[in-house]
Image: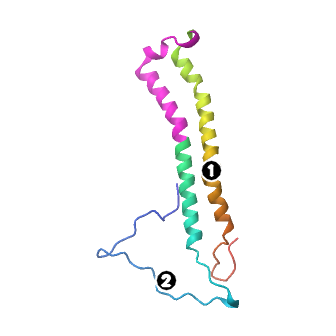
């Protein structure tokens, strides 16, 4: 279960979205000449990273469990097809059962590929940000 509430719809009162109490505050002037950073990009990057991780889990899980579901459905609904001989005299059901191992490995490889291609760059981007400061001025650890 995700605790990211950024995708939830905002409550509406009289057809309008209520503004937050901090929306109209002026930013406090930063000391020693440094520009105050906006943390919205940090939180946005975290939301994008969470969304990418959820998508990655769903795709890999559906790839492995989807094949297993098809195998179980064929076993129950088409037992004559599953007992019919196929390559080398093996029953089709046994051949499909043995094919679950490579399908599972393909799901793992798909997971690894999408992690390297999409999720890891997002994680590196989030790790480059400094965490937002707490109320006492110290960075969260």
Instruction: Write the residue at 51% across / 16% down.
Output: 92
Q: Around disc 1, counting alpha carbons within 10 Å, would you say few (fewer than 14), some (14 to 19), or many (20 or more)?
A: few
Report the quarter where the C terminus lies: bottom right
**In the rendered view, how is the structure colored?**
rainbow
The percent coordinates of residue 67 (x first, y second) are 51, 31
Note whether 38 is above or below 122 in the view shown: below
User: Residue placed farthest to the left in the image?
Assistant: 14
Magenta segment, which residues?
A: 61-88
Residue at point 68%, 89% (across, down)? 33
Picture coordinates of residue 19, whole percent (x, y): 41, 79
Residue 77, image x and y in percent? Answer: 40, 22
Query: According to the image, label 1 marks what residue?
Result: 117
Label of residue 75 in the image: none
| Residue that lies at the very extreme toward the top in this rendered image | 89
Secondary structure under badge 1? helix
Q: Which residue is mark 2?
A: 22
Relative to 84, is 10 on the left or the right? left
Q: Residue at x 58, y 28 (%)?
A: 100
Query: Which residue is drawn at the image coordinates 58% and 65% (left, top)?
Result: 45
C-alpha span from label 1 to label 2: 37 Å
Q: Main secondary structure of the magenta part?
A: helix
- Whether the residues at callouts 1 and 2 have beta carbons within 8 Å, the answer is no
Tell which of 126 and 3 is nearer to you: 126
User: Taking 67 as reference, is 74 above or below it?
Assistant: above
In front of the other: label 1 or label 2? 1
Q: Quadrant of residue 35?
A: bottom right
Of 10 and 105, nearer the camera is 105
Judge whether 46 appears above or below 138 on screen: above
Tell me where residue 6 appears, x and y as whole percent. Answer: 48, 65
Number of numbered discs on residues: 2
Classify mark 2: residues with Cα within 10 Å, few (<14), some (14-19) or many (20+). few
Whether residue 64 is in magenta: the answer is: yes
């Amino acid at each position: 279960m995700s605790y990211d509430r950024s995708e939830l719809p905002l409550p509406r009162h009289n057809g309008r979205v209520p503004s937050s109490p901090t929306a109209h505050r002026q930013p406090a002037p930063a000391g020693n000449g440094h520009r105050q950073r906006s943390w919205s990009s940090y939180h946005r990057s975290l939301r994008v990273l969470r969304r990418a991780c959820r998508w990655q889990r769903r795709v890999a899980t559906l790839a492995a469990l989807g094949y297993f579901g098809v195998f179980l459905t064929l076993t129950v609904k088409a037992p004559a097809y599953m007992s019919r001989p196929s390559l080398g005299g093996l029953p089709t059901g046994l051949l499909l059962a043995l094919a679950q191992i490579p399908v599972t490995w393909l799901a793992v490889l798909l997971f690894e590929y999408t992690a390297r291609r999409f999720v890891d760059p997002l994680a590196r981007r989030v790790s480059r940000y400094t965490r937002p400061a707490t109320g006492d001025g110290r960075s969260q650890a």
